[in-house]
Image (spheres, grey):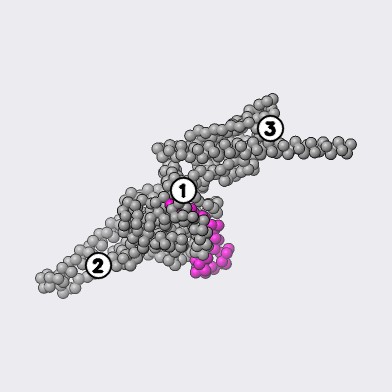
Amino acid sequence: MRLSTQIDIAAKSATVWDTITDPTQQLHFMHGITRWEVAGPIDRGVGARYRLLMRVGSAEVGSLIEVVEAVEQRDMAWVSVTGLDQRGRWRLRERANGARTHVEFRLSYGVAGAGFFGFVAERVAAPQVQRHLNRSLQQLKRQIEHEQLRRDAAARRAARERASVA
Amino acid sequence: MTPDPSTVPRSPNGRSTSGPPTPAQPPAADAGQGGANPVTALAGLAGRLGGRAARAVTGAVAGRIPRADLDERDPDFIRDNLPRLWLLSSLWFRGEVRGLGNVPDEGPALLVGNHSGGNMTPDTLVLTLAFSTYFGVERRFHSLAHNLVLSAPGLGMLRKFGTVAASPANLKTALDSGAALLVYPGGDHEVHRSSFERHTVDFAGRRGFVREALRHDVPIVPVVSIGGQETAFFLARGDRLARTLGLDRLLRLKVLPISLALPWGLNVGDFGGHIPLPAKIVIEVLPPIHLRDEFGPEPDVDEVYEHVVRLMQETLDALAAERRFPILG
């Protein structure tokens, strides 16, 4: 089953990239995720492994995933090593001369060999997983834009203080 | 249905060491003198036939009990069946499992649960699914079950899920392999308790799990579930009936439960199972109890038993307080 969602964030792609590749940030914006741990010697980039769990229906469904593609500020893709079969991708593209970033999140999942019940379960789970993805991107947008706002406000405050001192 | 493994007399190969019961012997004087007293001769004949039937049943069951072979657990089989379990657990039982992170990430652990739902135990299904998706099917997870469960036709698949016959030998093998092992000390006594006692943890004083945890030096992880006893209306255990019919000696069955269940209506014995009502199942996994850390180098079995039961009862009371309606949850 393949799901995807997208959103525009008013921030540079470098800022978005830093957030989505930071393992300590995942639990802050990923909806439905109950566990996200680094499982290996490196914590980001190609070869990084994470153990993640997402609540779907009555179970926390998880995988050990490995990042297999990382193009700085553009694409990051992963596949599962154990657990639920999945592959996913973050796709970032700059808009408005770099002032905004178009973010797309794709996720394919399934249980190979599960037959008819696997087919049904994938479709029954799809609305809930789709909701998790949508809310994750909305939270990512809120988080990044809010931080951006605070950084801009802090810069303006500092400028005002410098002006008043002068 | 899992009996307390330490209370079951068993040989090292996992089979019951108690032989078939000796049927009531007819009076010797009448046995070889048919016609001396027709009534007594008939009684003797009935006794002999009853004895043969009893031996036949015992032999049939004993012959069907598989040897404990932990390698029968098949991760690929479990993985292929997870979607089926997930559908059943999510849509029918609206299962909810909390605190699985309390199970130690590695190494053996003795998961001790309260048992509900008659012979169709939804709590085991929901927990097995949750454990397998949480830790992955690669992590060894076994459960001990009553001989009758493993020998029942059509339930051979349970062995692929890692279920083995309840015995001290199997428990040792499972824990030595580093598995998380699920036991239900209350066994058939608890699983068939009346629906009026559905919010009671009742291990019938079976302390074997504490002794085994101490012997193998593994933590006890209490697992409390609610909702299973609402999947049918359980009227009585029928323990006196079971004793009267000699089922305790024949089949290690201490109960002959009587319930109102689908599709039978009045269901005596629950041997054919039943269609469980779609009661919401909630399971809470409590933090592990490291016995020697908490109770000293030589823990008192009674004290540990009371502690575990009290913790589980308090959690069950809290879960019951959350529950607004039977079945709906």
Provide the chain ID for the residue under circle 1: B
Chain part drawn in magenta? B279-308
The residue depicted at 46 percent of the width and 66 percent of the height is B207
Q: Residue B23 carries which label?
A: 2
Q: Residues within 10 Å of mark 3 (few under 14, many from 20)?
A: many
User: Up-down: is B55 above or below A112?
Assistant: below
Q: Which secondary structure lies at badge 3?
A: loop
Q: Which chain carries label 3?
A: A
Dot 2 crowding, Cα within 10 Å, few <14, some 14–19, many 20+:
some
Quarter of the image for residue B10 reads bottom left
Disc 3 target residue: A11
- In-front residue for pair B226/A52: B226
| Picture quarter with the N terminus of chain B | bottom left
Q: Tell me where residue B47 appears, x and y as whole percent.
A: 21, 67
Q: How crowded is mark 1: few (under 14 residues within 10 Å), some or many (20 or more)?
A: many
**Hey, what amino acid is under mark 2?**
Pro
Kind of residue sitting beneath label 1: Arg
Disc number for residue B94:
1
User: Can residue B289 be found in the magenta stretch?
Assistant: yes
Front residue (pair B183, B99): B99
Residue occupying the point 43% across, 43% down: B87
- Closest to the observer: A98 or A18? A98
